[in-house]
């Protein structure tokens, strides 16, 4: 857990990364689908959009809205291979390992759970 706390702390110091937060519609979606489904979506998105060695549209493959995982990817700098390299020191130009995919999904889910924990309906 330490490594996740460490990178999330560093990301929180970035004006850009810390500007991402889930909206009411995201919380509603998570509530309707459940966290297990959201985690499955995260694995699916990461395997398809981030794991391949060559991504033709790298840097543009993750939308800025439309799914809680997309927001979390931007907040955690797991949105493209360039950000993965810059923030997480995961090399480009090779397929992600199963352990790296697990790390990314775990980080996304920790971020989402922190957003849920800090969400109060009257505070946003």
Image: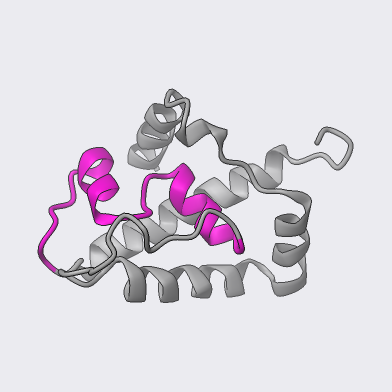
Q: Examine the rendered structure and indicate whether residue 121 appears above or below residue 28.
A: above
Q: Residue at x 25, y 60 (%)?
A: 100
Considering every residue shown, the one lying at the far right of the view is: 122
Left or right of 64? Residue 14 is left
Q: Examine the rendered structure and indicate whether residue 94 appears above or below residue 88.
A: below
Q: How far across and how far down the image is residue 121, in percent?
A: 86, 42
Left or right of 57? Residue 20 is right
Q: Residue at x 27, y 60 (%)?
A: 58
Q: Which quadrant of the structure image shows residue 11? A: top left
Range drawn in magenta: 66-94
Q: Residue at x 78, y 61 (%)?
A: 28
Q: How far across and how far down the image is residue 118, in percent?
A: 70, 37
Q: Please state the total of marks drawn on the protein image.
A: 0
Q: How far across and how far down the image is residue 8, in percent?
A: 43, 35
Name the image quarter holding the C terminus: top right
- Residue 77 is covered by the magenta coloring: yes
- Seen from the viewer's position, the closer of residues 63 and 27 is 63
Name the image quarter holding the N terminus: top left
Q: Which quadrant of the structure image shows residue 27? A: bottom right
Q: Residue at x 10, y 62 (%)?
A: 93
- Seen from the viewer's position, the closer of residues 34 and 74 is 74
- Seen from the viewer's position, the closer of residues 22 and 117 is 22
- Residue 34 is covered by the magenta coloring: no
Q: How far across and how far down the image is residue 92, in percent?
A: 14, 56
Left or right of 102? Residue 90 is left
């Amino acid at each position: 857990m330490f490594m996740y706390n460490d990178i999330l702390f560093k990301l929180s110091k970035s004006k850009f990364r810390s500007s991402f937060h889930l909206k009411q519609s995201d919380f509603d979606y998570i509530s309707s689908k459940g966290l297990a489904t959201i985690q499955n979506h995260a694995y699916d998105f990461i395997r398809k959009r981030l794991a391949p060695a060559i991504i033709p549209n790298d840097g543009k493959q993750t939308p800025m809205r439309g799914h809680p995982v997309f927001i979390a990817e931007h907040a955690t700098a797991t949105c493209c291979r360039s950000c993965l390299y810059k923030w997480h020191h995961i090399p480009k130009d090779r397929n992600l390992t199963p352990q790296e995919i697990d790390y990314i999904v775990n980080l996304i889910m920790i971020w989402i759970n922190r957003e849920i924990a800090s969400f109060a309906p009257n505070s946003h």
